[in-house]
Image (cartoon, rainbow, N blue to C red):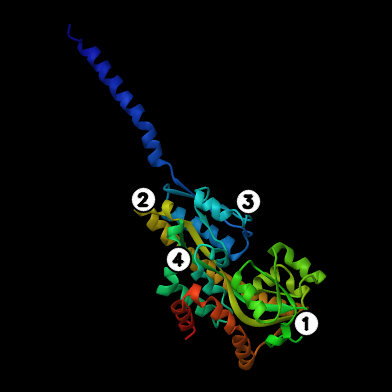
Amino acid sequence: MNSTPSLRRRQCVAVLAGAAFLSAPALVAAQTPITVKFSHVVAEKTPKGMGALKFKELAEKKLPGKVQVQVFPSSQLFGDAKEMEALLLGDVQLIAPSLSKFDRYTKKIQVFDLPFLFDDIGAVDSFQSSPAGQALLKSMTNRGLLGLAYWHNGMKQLSTNRDPLKRPEDVKGLKFRIQASDVLEAQFRALGANPQKMAFSEVYQALQTGVVDGQENTWSNIYSQKFHEVQKTIAETNHGVIDYMVVTNAKWWDGLPADVRKGLSEAMAEATTYANKLADDINQEDRKKIEAAGKAKIQTLGKDDVAAWRKSMEPVWKKFEGDIGRDLIDAALKANK
């Protein structure tokens, strides 16, 4: 028996309602923003911390409703030892470790630890934006890592509990705290000094109690950690750089929709400009604050002094040239011109 018109209408409504119900989860999924977790180990009121917040602001503005950036500062999610593993496992999408942390993924990154390679932060910028510097960002994709940008901390200065601090012989026999880095260890051994690997949080007390005699760091780190209060002399050496690489999971990045990837790239470029200018400004300001405090003497170096330091570092360059590549070292040197 044929259905009545009213029965057929009820059946059509039911089918349409069912179809709408079945498509609802897909519709919700399409509207759910992509979550981007940005984890880092420093405080928010630092160039890296403020750069991460600027990236969040820009990314969400460029991709409204498409992405949600969650920033976790001060090791809230993962500390130094775990953040790389967390990124590779997909537990976070962005981290920004020190460049020294990447030498187990590519030895070429050790170029940034070579002492007296760059004249100033402008040369560092020039190299990082060159084809050779940009290629380093992509040099770890076979290990699952993709670099998106370089963020500055700044140029390193050398400090000790002695005076003077002008020539390589002035540090012979002294104990220096270093980050875990084969290059930095070789750097101090070439000077006849004793490098001591130590967590950043332990440095102030180690300097205060004489466990180590000196350290190397940026002006902003020296001031914020009050190292100038427990050191006698800070030599303005600009002998190295402490920078970060903002890095993501290569597979996750490649799997993003093209428009999202484009928007995040643009946000990262703008956040990088902001963070790097901020780092430079803070370093200049903190140098003045250290000088005004009058607790540590700032020792400037002449051309002959710098030449002596560079000569003493030649064995370090030779030792790591094979791993880094002479072509990469030459490209970095070219940035000084």
Kindly identify which residue carries mark 3: 76
Tell me the number on the disc at residue 257.
Answer: 2
The amino acid type, in three-letter code, at marker 3 is Gln
Going from N to C along the chain, the mark reached first, 4 or 2, is 4
Going by the numbered disc 4, the residue's amino acid type is: Leu
Give the CA separation, mark 4 to mark 3: 26 Å
Q: Which residue is mark 1?
A: 162
> Where does residue 220 sit, x and y in percent of width and height?
65, 71
Q: Foreground residue, 119 or 61?
A: 119
Amino acid at dot 1? Arg
Q: Position of residue 138 (x, y in %)?
A: 42, 64
* Among the two numbered marks 3 and 2 on one chain, the one whose residue lies closer to the N terminus: 3
Disc 1 packing (10 Å; few <14; some 14–19; many ≥20): some
For label 4, the residue is: 137
Of 94 and 295, the residue lying toward us: 94
Tell me if mark 4 has few (under 14), some (14-19) or many (20+) residues whose alpha carbon lies within 10 angstroms of its own.
many
Tell me, yes or no, whether the two marked residues, 4 and 1, touch with CB atoms within 8 Å. Answer: no
Image quadrant in which you'd find residue 152:
bottom right
Query: Which label's residue is closer to the chain start, 3 or 1?
Result: 3
How far, Cα to Cα, is label 3 from label 1?
38 Å
> Which kind of residue does numbered mark 2 sit on?
Pro
Residue 284 visible in the picture: no
Outermost residue, right side: 209
Question: Is residue 162 among the parts visible in the rendering?
Answer: yes
Position of 91 relative to 277 (above/below): above
